[in-house]
Image (tube, rainbow, N blue to C red):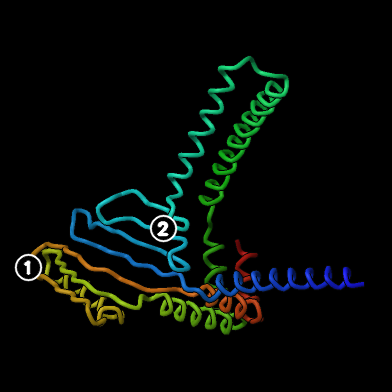
Amino acid sequence: MAIILAILKFLGILLLVVLSLVLFVSASLLFVPVRYVVEFREGKPVRLGFRVSWFLRAIQIRKSVSADKVYVHLFGMDVQSLKKLFQREKKQKKEHKERHGSKSRVELVNDLNNEAKKQEKSYRKEQKGYKAKTSKRNKKSFSFNKISSIITFIRSYEHRSGLNKIKKEFIALFRYLMPDKIHGRISFGTGDPCTTGWILGAVSMFRVAYTDGLTILPHFEEKIFVAEGYVKGKVHPVYFLRLFMRGYMDDDIKRCIRHVLKMI
């Protein structure tokens, strides 16, 4: 009896540990923010750099302003370096097999299977090319009937409530994705005072133009574009889960989406 109780106790502790790990991972995926930093510096064209990190930089994707290569780091280790290391080991094993003896029957069968897979891949590529050509033809056959159906869909009273809700969700999403901090200087000019003034007026319509730390300098008589600074922000994955649930639970939004899918 004591042995059975000890086994049940062990299984209970093991189950509790597994459930705790599942809850911890789920909470981390939903509530730990994904942080990003985007840098821009003067150049022809403007040089861009970025860093996207999650969970205290356990997972990190970055690109330096002065480099073109994108690096992916997993727990501080470069994924590309690990990949090259595995490829080198695989190559060494292959060379070792080639040096010691001819291919066995299993290897010959594997070679035949690989050849068959290559032929199948080439056939699939041909089919994809055919489908792409067909889709291009279908795009070219876009008629005024589709345009009129889109206009009718937008103007219809039945979908007005759903479209208004979708519009509000997109505006809220745009505001949510705005960075927490912006710092920099942008000087621009087209050489034409009229065009420069029009661009300045268009930019002034957005709230980001009035952010502290960002300076926008128009040059009405000179053709110039100089940008330097950075933006910094974070995104919580749980927001997108709530966004999906709001859309899934709303009948008006689902009705609009179903209608759009039928039109496509």
Q: Foreground: 138 or 88?
A: 88
> Is residue 154 in sight in this rendering?
no
Nearest to the observer: residue 17 or residue 204: 17
The residue shown at (50%, 36%) is: 87
Q: Nearer the viewer, mark 2 or mark 1?
A: 2
110 to the left or right of 171: right
- Quadrant containing the N terminus in the rendered view: bottom right
Which amino acid type corresponds to the residue marked 2 in the rendered image? Answer: Ile
Pointer 2 and pointer 1: residues touching (CB < 8 Å)?
no
Q: Is residue 8 above or below residue 79?
A: below
The quadrant the C terminus occupies is bottom right
At 45% from the left and 69% from the top, the residue drawn is 34
Q: Secondary structure at mark 1?
A: loop
Measuring 41% from the left and 58% from the top, which residue is drawn there?
Answer: 61
Mark 1 belongs to which amino acid? Glu
Using residue 141 as the reference point, say whether residue 84 is left or right of it.
left
- The residue to which callout 1 is attached is 221
Name the residue beneath numbered marker 2: 61
Which residue occupies 56% across, 50% down?
Answer: 138
